[in-house]
Structures are given as structure tokens and as C-alpha cells.
Amino acid sequence: MKTLHIKTFGCQMNVYDSARMADLLAPLGYRPVNDPARADMVILNTCHIREKAADKVFSDLGRLRLDKQAAAAEGRRMVLVVAGCVAQAEGAEILRRAPYVDLVVGPQGYTRLPDLLARLGPPAGQRVATEFPVEPKFDLLPAPSADGPSAFLSVQEGCDRFCAFCVVPYTRGAEYSRPAAEVLADARALVRQGVREITLVGQNVNAYHGAPGGLGRLLRDLAGLDRLDRLRYTTSHPADMDDDLVAAHRDVPALMPFLHLPVQSGADRVLKAMNRRHTADDYRRTVDRLRAARPDIALSSDFIVGFPGETEAEFAATMDLVAEIGFAQAYSFKYSPRPGTPAAELPDRVPDAVAGDRLTRLQDRLNADQEAFNRACVGRVMPVLLDRPGRHPGQLVGRGPYMQAVHAPSRTARLGDLVDLEIVAAHPNSLSGLPVGATADTRVCA
Ligand code: 5AD
Ligand code: SF4
């Protein structure tokens, strides 16, 4: 028996890949542990999307170097692996700056982990796998194993949209959609293991074209699976929201009324410079279509402030769009120039202090909107899928339809249950719920 610690940075694609790495290594006797210092193998599954995320890898490696030395002093070998998008983009740099790293594997190359390990040889025999294999990585992966009632299922890899700020088309490669039959087979395997909610993940998931009819058709097919109660998908591009997919929000009850639809900016000139290929009004119209199909749909988004050349008026256009749409939740970032992307070459960098000030103003507004949305949930009854223990004893946590974390007293339900809860309190980032008709006695736990 060997031990494995995986630390995951970044997006849901990485969460999915980390789970598959664990699946690939399980037959070799590796079981997961929480403490990296005690692990026989540590994998950092890294993110390259912004400079800050990429920098974290090197600070983590510095700490792991000491753990690895301590292990060696005890006569144990710790295999140190850097995976993910930093591995893909900066493989050589990682080996130069951290020569104690044993393996560097990209988002497509990690399927070779068992083979690379077998050939690892004595310490310092480093190996790198950052090629994009001809055979899609999904053909090289074992059937997914479930870890709880909610699972990510990757239907797509890479992106062909080339937004000017984004490293994804370079780190993840060209877009590839898995055939629908394969996706359905994985979904069935997950459902057999008790999974009740599947989130389809892809870098630009609504461009999925692994079957005629695209993502809308795939969602309808998945909704036909017995005991699969909930479907979600992420992350989407506004210009790929076709009519059938919008209609799926009307027709498929299992499809949750929540959509993460990044807009990035509310100013048309900025959107054009970002190569987003839609206007702010196009986005408004898409939201209107979605709300017409599913009136209770809640929206989430991503924003970048301080994109090169962004003026105060253009930032104000973003604030206007935010005020109009009313997002239930959102992520926002300062623009971070990424090597190799077209935007990194643009003139008129926005000074950091200006971008920081805009980010604060935007986040204040987004946070206020999120709190208002959460407060509006109080008094409502919503189905919650309890998927993890809470931080406090006697508490379970799950997700409602709108992705908020909902805390509930554990003595009234079990992990994995989908229960109707009455929302009794709202907090900035979560809700508290009680079983419908609960007595005052049960309320103390919430
Ligand atoms: N700088 C800042 N934010 C970025 N994102 C992607 N690339 C960058 C960058 N270079 C943000 C976008 C995207 C989210 C995943 O990360 O908002 O939607
Ligand atoms: Fe990056 Fe998303 Fe644009 Fe693709 S659609 S290039 S993943 S921001």
C-alpha cells in the first residue's frame, strides 16, 4: 500500500483531472491521504490562468522540497509530480527552478503516469510528458469512480475560441468533444455508484459537438437516466448559447436553474479587443432568452477589470451591465498579462492601482447582489443535495439549485440525501436550512 496526496488548483477541469489521476494510480496501490509530508507521492495539479495562480506552485514546491528531504532522511522516497497547466506551459522552467521534481505531466500527458512511474528509476531520473497525444486522453482513462453524490464529468477538452487574454487554448490545446455514447457510459457508471448530480465540464462546454444536436441533445439524453436527479454544465461562452440549449432549460427539469455564463466586460470595445465575438447587448439578449425559458434561472459570471486600454467609462459600462442583470454570484479578477497570449502585447496597460480600485468597486457591488439574492431565499423551500459533513459537529452541507452551500442539522438527514429544506437564514456565502415543518427543537443545530 502506498500513499498519494493531490493538491488541486484552479478550475473544475483540474478537479476532474485530479480524480482521474487518483483512479489511474489506485490499481498501483496508491490511496489518498491528507498530509503531503507522509505521502509516497505528491501531485500538484496546477493552474496557469493568472500569474498569481502560477506563482503559488513555486512557493508550494519550496515547502515540498523540505518534506521530500525529511522523507529521504527517514529512508522513504517521495515522488514529486507537477501536473496541470503550469506543467504544460512551463515544464522546462519547473525542472530548472525545482530540480527535485520527479515528473512533469500536462493535462493530456497524465494518462502516462503509471508508465512514467514504472520507468522512473533512481532519484533524479526526471521525466516530462507534455505532448498532446494523438489518441484522446479519455480513451486512456479508466471508468470514473465516484466520490460522493455529486460528480464532475468531462465532456470536452481544450478551447478554439482564443480570447485574447486566455492561456487555455495553449495549455489545453484544440477543442475536442467526447462522443456522446462515451459520456453516457461514464454517467451510467457514476449513477451505479450512487451519484445523483452530474456537472458536465469543459473549457467551453456549450460548444460541445460530440453528437448531433450538441449539448442540448446530450443533456436531454442524460436526463433520461434513472436516478440521476440533477444536471449542470460549466463553463459556457455566451456566443455558443444556441436555441436548443436554451430550450433544454425549459424542457429538462433535472437541469438546475443556475448558469455560469462569463461576460468579462460590459463595454463593446473591450469585448472586441478581448476577441469575445459578442457585444454587451448580445449578452443581455441571451440572458433574456434564458429567463424566458426558465424564469427562475440564476446567473453567475466572470469579469476581468483593467484589460489594456480600459477607460473609466468602459468600466462604468461593466457596472451598468452588472446592475441590470443582477447576478446571484460572480468571480472577478484584475487582468493578468499571460506570456504567449495576444493581449499581453497590447499597449495602454492600466496601472495596477486603477485596476485594483475598479476591482474593489465591482466586487462590492457583486457581493451586495449575492447577499441580496441569498436573503431573498429565506422562507423558501428548496431541494438540497447533502454532499459533505459540515465544519461543526451535527451539521451537513449541501447545495441547493442555485449552487449556494446550505447547512442543515445532520440528525434529520444523511449524507447523499436530496432533501427539501426550508431556508431559515442567509449568510454572505451560504444559507441555513431546516427540514420542512421542523420543530423548534431541531432548530438549535442550524
Ligand atoms: N487575467 C485575468 N483573468 C483571467 N481569466 C482568464 N484569463 C485571465 C487573465 N489573463 C479569467 C476570466 C475567465 C476566468 C476563468 O478567469 O474571467 O472567465
Ligand atoms: Fe479561455 Fe474561455 Fe475564452 Fe476559451 S472561451 S479562450 S477557455 S476564456
Image (cartoon, helix red, strand yellow):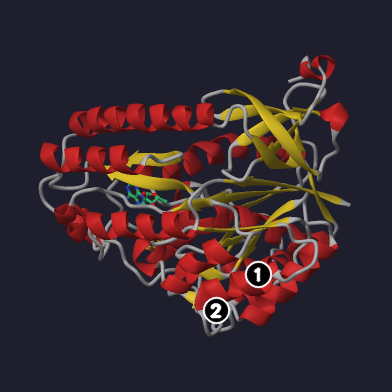
Task: Determine whether 292 is above or below 180 in the image.
Answer: above
In the picture, measured across the screen, residue 302 lies left or right of residue 323, that is right
Q: Amino acid at mark 1?
A: Thr
Classify residue 352 as left or right of residue 134: left
From this view, report whether residue 47 is shown above or below residue 17.
above
> Which of the marked residues, 1 or 2, is nearer the chain's N terminus?
1
- Residue 356 falls in image quadrant: top left
Q: Is residue 229 visible?
A: yes
Real-space Cα separation, disc 1 to disc 2, in angstroms: 10 Å
Please tell me whether residue 407 is drawn above or below residue 283 in the rendered image: above
Position in image of residue 48 (x %, y %):
43, 52
Q: Is mark 1 within 8 Å of ligand 2?
A: no
- Residue visible at 53% across and 72% down in the picture: 215
Residue picked out by circle 1: 111
The answer to which quarter of the image holds residue 73 is top right
Q: Is residue 18 left or right of residue 238?
A: right
Residue situated in front as seen by the camera: 124 or 256: 256
Q: Are marks 1 and 2 in contact (CB under 8 Å)?
A: yes
Q: Position of residue 159 (x, y in %)?
A: 42, 69
- Which residue in the protein does label 2 denote? 133
Mark drawn on residue 132: none
The C terminus - image quarter: top right
Q: Give the answer, above or below, for where 248 lies relative to 355.
A: below
What kind of residue is marked 2?
Pro
Residue 334 shows in the view: no
State the image quarter where residue 441 is shown: top right
Classed neighbour count for the residue bearing mark 2: other residues with Cα under 10 Å, few (<14), some (14–19), many (≥20): few
Ligand 2, image quadrant it occupies: bottom left
Where does the image place residue 40, in percent across and percent down from the top left? 76, 47
Instruction: Identify the secondary structure beneath mark 1.
Output: helix
Q: Residues within 10 Å of mark 1 (few under 14, many from 20)?
A: many
Name the residue at 43% across, 57% down: 292
